[in-house]
Image (spheres, grey):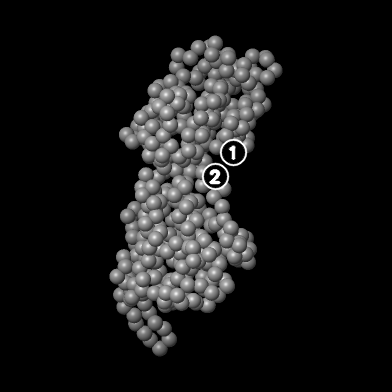
Amino acid sequence: MRLLCDHPNTIKLYEVFEDKESYHLILELCSGGELFDQIIAKGHFSEKDAAEKMHCLLDFIAYAHSKNIIHRDLKPENILLSDKTPHAVLKVIDFGTSDFCLDGQRLSQKFGTPYYVAPEVLKKDYDKSADIWSAGVIMFILLCGYPPFGGKTDAKILQRVQAGQFSFDGKEWEVVTEAAKDMISQMLVMDITKRATAKQLLQHRWFQVAATAPAAALGAHMVKRLRAFAGMSRMKRLALVVLARTLTDNDVKRLRELFVAMDTNNDGRIDSQDLHKALEKVGAAIDESEMQDLFHASDIDGSGQIDYEEFIAAMLDSNRVARRKEAVRKSFEELDKDGDGFITAEDLVKVMPRGSSIELAREMVNEVDKNNDGRVDYAEVRVCCCVVSCGF
């Protein structure tokens, strides 16, 4: 700890006292709690916040390794925050299993925590790069909220660690940049000769990309969903907007972050220029005429701007939402203005953009009115939502 005390992300050791039974280490007070607790509270971090923490952690690792020191138990529980402010400094603690390891030297003692331990440590043949694997696990968790190698028991976790297989298939990863995934993939490498060093990782392009995240997160995925939304009928698009109103913040947390990033003047709306800039920033710029078509398709109320609910409707994973019967039920009740158990053209025109005609409302009802009785019941709306989901 004294050898590393010059680094800002090492917890400070002020003094050591000794009595007949113990050594007493006097450390700086870190009142911000563990990084682990922040992960539990947040669920996951934005890429910008995760990048700030990972840069500090990797800078610490690079410094420690330059001093030929390996930590051997890096995990969120061993990372404290100096205070409770938004700009708290990250502090690495718990050097009880740390050791000296020269370049080219191999260690054989098995230390670490199941979720974070490197597979070569389990084989008792490893070097300083084991810390990089642990850091990769931490970055994975920061971005999605769960570990890459999970299991109900330590044995199952370690079995998966030894296999070294992980994926970015979860819905949380749909809106994470490819740069972030690439950096994790350079850390969680089974072959330690191919695993990146901390010094190399500090130069990774993700640290530049993350500064613009989450706007950079969707990229081509964002364009794909806009195109799918534009290809739907107006009735289906309106149904999704109403469906979006029933969702909680947890359902759309990443999408809310993306919308806020694009809403530069904080008025709760984005215009075509905001959308164009966002697509341009992620290298997914499309032809101006197509961009205008996609924008107008998402602008359900014809205001010339896309509000929050319209954006969520265009971006959400409707396949998952459509399976939530309570969400579809709430949407139906919202459209059934007179509460008679059916949606009529008269009901529909009340939630359509101002100035919409009753004739258009009738056309939209006819799109999903399978029994041709001039009204839509819950079962027909349910089928409509399921059809919507197939577009994604």
Classify residue 329 as left or right of residue 82: right
Secondary structure of residue under mark 2: helix
- Residue 18, percent across and down? 36, 85
Q: Quadrant of residue 56?
A: bottom left
Q: Which mark is residue 169?
A: none
Tell me the residue that label 1 is attached to: 320
Using the rendered image of the protein, determine whether residue 334 is visible from the camera's viewpoint: no
Quadrant for the N terminus, please. bottom left
Placement of 351 over or under 254, stated as above or below: above
Q: Disc 2 marks which residue?
A: 171
Amino acid type, mark 2: Lys
The image quarter in which residue 267 lies? top left
Sort mark 2 into few (<14), some (14-19) or many (20+) by Cα contacts within 10 Å. Answer: few
Residue 193, image x, y percentages: 49, 66
Q: Residue at x 50, y 56 (%)?
A: 185
Any part of residue 68 in sight: yes
Q: Position of residue 326 (x, y in %)?
A: 60, 35
Which of labels 2 and 1 is toward the front?
A: 2
Image-based side of 263 in relation to 327, left or right: left
Pointers 2 and 1 in contact (CB under 8 A)?
yes
At label 1, counting other C-alpha atoms closer than 10 Å, the crowd grade (few under 14, some 14-19, many 20 or more) is: few
Q: Residue at x 62, y 64 (%)?
A: 159
260 lies left or right of 43: left
**136 or 262, which is in the foreground?**
136
Q: Is residue 366 left or right of residue 40?
A: right
| Residue 85, percent from left and from top | 33, 55
Q: Residue at x 42, y 48 (%)?
A: 46
Name above or below for residue 234 compared with residue 147.
Answer: above
